[in-house]
């Protein structure tokens, strides 16, 4: 850290470093909230799949996040709310899909089966029913890798404000050494973009020409 860095920014930097270390050791508030949430879902036999950044971490792309994304059905969401609201959870606002774990201070973003990624408009790729599209990995159920990649590609292709989803796929290809032929398992509407990102992922920073 430079000597002329303001003290408050310096403290913020080191706080961020400490929080990242806790995250990658799974000892932070987000991991605690995830374990708490999945215990509730499992105890009530509510089908679900963890998606978003926590799923990326599970599949090999390690990046810090401050919230949890989970796929449910409408019925599953209603069952979850009936079970937990007022008991360590509140709605983000009255009637919202999203919840907040008040014990850990973590937001829980809920995506419903049947919704469309990205711009929300109808497209070949749709959020699936977690009862048919989830796989157990350790103590939680996650969206299968191919479905996660497919949804992120569809999201980034359809919504300019979701370009981060395309970057996530690029970094996941690198981190997890995903094969080119994974594209064969993806919907036709996103396959070309996967192959394009796969080719881009084969170029290391050291090989790139100077800017």
Image (cartoon, rainbow, N blue to C red):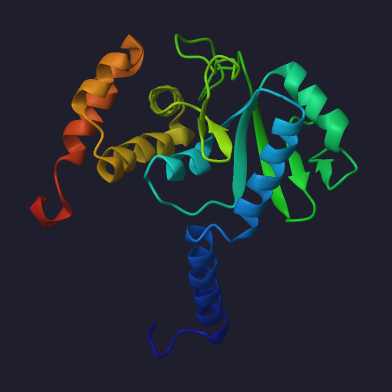
Residue drawn at x 52%, y 69% as measured from the top left:
16
Quadrant of the snapshot with the N terminus? bottom left
Residue 94 seen from this side: no
| Residue found 45% across the figure and 24% down from its top | 151
Depicted 155 relative to depicted 22: above or below: above
* Residue furthest to the bottom: 3
| Residue toward you, 140 or 194 | 140
Q: Position of residue 140 (x, y in %)?
A: 58, 37
34 relative to 3, above or below: above
In this rendered view, identify the residue nearer to me: 99 or 143: 143
Residue that appears at 82% across and 44% down: 89
Q: Toward which corner of the image does residue 185 lie, by quadrant?
A: top left
Looking at the image, residue 56 sits to the left or right of residue 89; the answer is left
Q: Is residue 61 left or right of residue 142?
A: left
Q: How many marks?
A: 0
Is residue 182 rendered to the left or right of residue 73? Answer: left
- Residue 99 at x, y = what percent? 76, 39
Residue at left offset 55%, top offset 74%: 15
Residue 49: give x, y in percent of width and height. 58, 28
Q: Is residue 203 above or below residue 18?
A: above
Q: Considering the image in quadrants, where does the C terminus appear?
A: bottom left
Residue 8 visible in the displayed image: yes
33 or 192: nearer the eye?
33
């Amino acid at each position: 850290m430079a000597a002329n860095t303001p003290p408050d920014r310096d403290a913020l930097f080191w706080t961020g470093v400490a929080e990242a270390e806790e995250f990658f050791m799974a000892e932070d508030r987000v991991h605690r909230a995830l374990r708490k949430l999945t215990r509730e879902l499992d105890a009530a036999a509510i089908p679900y799949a963890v998606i978003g950044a926590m799923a990326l971490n599970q599949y090999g792309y390690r990046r810090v996040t401050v919230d949890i994304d989970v796929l449910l059905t409408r019925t599953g969401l209603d069952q979850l709310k009936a079970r937990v609201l007022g008991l360590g959870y509140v709605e983000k606002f009255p009637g919202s899909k999203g919840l907040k774990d008040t014990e850990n201070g973590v937001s829980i973003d809920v995506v419903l089966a049947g919704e469309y990624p990205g711009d929300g408009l109808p497209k070949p790729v749709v959020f699936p029913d977690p009862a048919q599209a989830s796989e157990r990995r350790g103590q939680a159920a996650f969206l299968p890798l191919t479905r996660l990649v497919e949804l992120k590609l569809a999201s980034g292709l359809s919504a300019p404000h979701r370009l981060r989803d395309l970057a996530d796929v690029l970094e996941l290809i690198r981190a997890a050494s995903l094969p080119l032929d994974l594209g064969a398992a993806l919907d036709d509407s996103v396959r070309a973009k996967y192959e394009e990102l796969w080719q881009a992922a084969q170029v290391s920073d050291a090989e790139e020409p100077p800017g």
